[in-house]
């Protein structure tokens, strides 16, 4: 299972390339959503307030326990701020940072995520 957030659509397009059920986090469901199967969380990089959607979701202990790792999506033009949202969440919730990719990801990025998903089944 994949849980992801996507504001502009890059991460959604990436997730659509991975052969795995997925749930999209939004402002409407982040407080109510409770998963019952292990998952990988994919988060694009935006301001602190935007990533509060993900924070709210992970503050649910069941979700936190089922999350097997975080993947960051971003843009390398942001240099040292590349994928800082995923890096910060990984530290804050003590979850492994599995991978970082740009925009809609390459076929190698898809392969990497498929491997990580296989490892958690
Ligand atoms: C306002 C804004 C701020 C961004 N800040 C960062 C950033 O600090 N670091 C980074 O790696 N990418 C940053 N990005 C790039 C996005 O994280 C990247 O385009 C991502 O693929 C967007 O995912 P989405 O289309 O699923 O929302 C920013 C994009 C926007 C529009």
Image: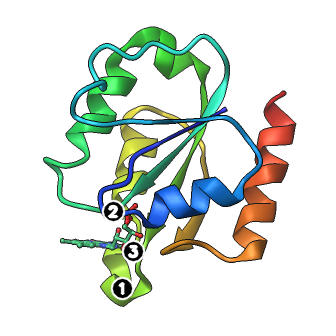
Task: Kindly report which numbered mark, 3 or 2, lies closer to the viewer in this rendering.
Answer: 2
Residue 79 has which mark?
A: 1
User: Left or right: 118 with respect to 102?
Assistant: right
- Judging by the rendered image, the residue that carries numbered circle 2 is 45
| On screen, residue 30 above or below 42 | above
Asked if the residues shown at circle 3 and circle 1 are in contact, with their CB atoms under 8 angstroms apart, the answer is yes
Q: Position of residue 4 (x, y in %)?
A: 47, 43
User: Left or right: 1 with respect to 59?
Assistant: right
Q: Position of residue 83 (x, y in %)?
A: 41, 66
Mark 3 to mark 2 CA distance (whole Å): 8 Å
| Residue in front for this viewpoint, 84 or 46 | 46
- Of labels 3 and 2, earlier in sequence is 2
Secondary structure of the residue carrying numbered label 1? helix
- Judging by the rendered image, the residue that carries numbered circle 3 is 82
Q: Position of residue 77 (x, y in %)?
A: 36, 89
For the N terminus, which image quadrant? top right
Secondary structure of the residue carrying numbered label 3? loop
Residue drawn at x 29%, y 33% as measured from the top left: 55
């Amino acid at each position: 299972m994949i849980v992801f957030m996507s504001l502009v659509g890059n991460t959604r397009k990436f997730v659509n390339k991975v052969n795995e059920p997925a749930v999209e986090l939004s402002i409407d469901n982040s407080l109510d959503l409770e998963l019952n199967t292990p998952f990988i969380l994919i988060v694009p990089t935006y301001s602190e307030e935007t990533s509060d959607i993900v924070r709210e979701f992970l503050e649910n202990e069941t979700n936190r326990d089922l999350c097997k790792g975080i993947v960051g999506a971003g843009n390398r033009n942001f240099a040292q701020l590349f994928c800082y949202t995923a890096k910060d969440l990984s530290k804050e919730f003590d979850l492994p940072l599995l991978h970082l990719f740009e925009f809609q990801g390459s076929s190698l990025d898809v392969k990497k995520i498929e491997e990580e998903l296989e490892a958690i089944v």
